[in-house]
Image: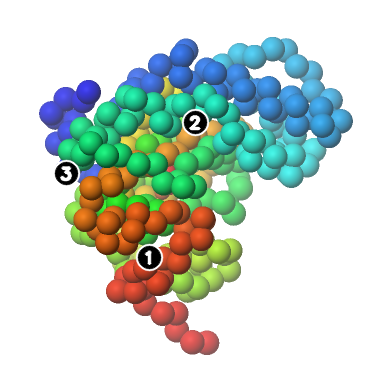
Amino acid sequence: MISSGEREFFESEGYLLIKGFFDREREIAPIQRDAYAIIGLVAERHGVDLARTGFDPESFDRDYYRLLEVDRRFAGEVYDLAKQIPSFLRLISSETSEALFRELRGTDHAGIGAASYGIRIDNPNEDKFRSHWHQEFLFQPQSIDGIVFWTPLAPVRDDMGAVIILPKSHKDGLCVYSKGTTYADKVGAYQIGIHDEAAVVAKYEQVAPLTEPGDLLIMDFLTIHGSGENRSARSRWSIQSRFFNYNDPVGMKVGWKSSITAGTDVEALFPDNFVSAPRS
Ligand SMILES: O=C(O)CCC(=O)C(=O)O
Ligand SMILES: [Fe+2]
């Protein structure tokens, strides 16, 4: 599926960009087509007039910006509905993706955790929902050898806030985290951050690969990464999914828990990886 060089790169760097992994016509365009339709239907529901000119994969999101302008909540409806597109669910559980995971992890039992997948729409200059530095395993405690699958629905240009990755950070294991310190003003899971974040991040180089629809970016569950800043005029549309390994002993020990967003108490699960916030 991938060359031995690519596999070695993934193992040493903790991430890998695979150009043209998905078929744009067969696997990506049906998702874009449904997203285009949903934008139209949400507009209709709210009586927003759109000058619809028909679906074009290059600009499937064209009319979304009108919704964003009229009412941010209408854009939020599109966000919630996009995750329910059948061709999206087919893509994240495609045989080729599962086979890639199985090959990389040497397992014949791959899983997709509850609430571990979605479609992000990172709107221009909207920083509230950006993910700050994190490792996937803390938030998705399914198996420590899990892999994030990240693929864009629209091209990611250099002003669109591509995901920033810290190569080789996976080699240093699960970080220590704290809650309610650096990110005390955030909501829920976003309050958790790497303890002494600036010092940890400064130890590594940073890369932010640009991607096209069809490209697949994979990241080790221990690789530190975060969202870039979208300063362009177009939203950054991207698909996230994650595979875990049922055979992983760490996953077995913690009980292959679902995502923090599905209610897993990660502080209770990883007491050794949390320092408590200083009392104020
Ligand atoms: O797309 C982003 O900005 C962050 C993605 C991420 O953290 C992930 O896919 O695990
Ligand atoms: Fe992540």
Q: Is residue 3 left or right of residue 167?
A: left
Q: Is residue 12 left or right of residue 63?
A: left
Mark 3 sits on what residue?
12
Task: Between residue 67 and residue 268, name the one nearer to us.
Answer: 268
Mark 2 sits on what residue?
89
Comparing marks 1 and 2, which lies closer to the viewer?
Answer: 2
Residue at horizontal 45 percent and vertical 39 percent from the top: 240
Any atom of ligand 2 within 8 Å of the CB at mark 3? no
Precedes in sequence: disc 1 or disc 2:
2
In this figure, which colouring scheme has been used for the structure? rainbow
Distance from disc 2 to disc 3, alpha carbons, whole Å, reads 30 Å
Residue at horizontal 70 percent and vertical 28 percent from the top: 39
Query: Within 10 Å of the Cα at label 2, are there few (<14), some (14-19), or many (20+) other Cα atoms?
Result: some
Task: Between residue 111 and residue 56, name the one nearer to us.
Answer: 111
The image shows residue 12, relative to residue 95, as above or below, that is below
Mark 1 sits on what residue?
194
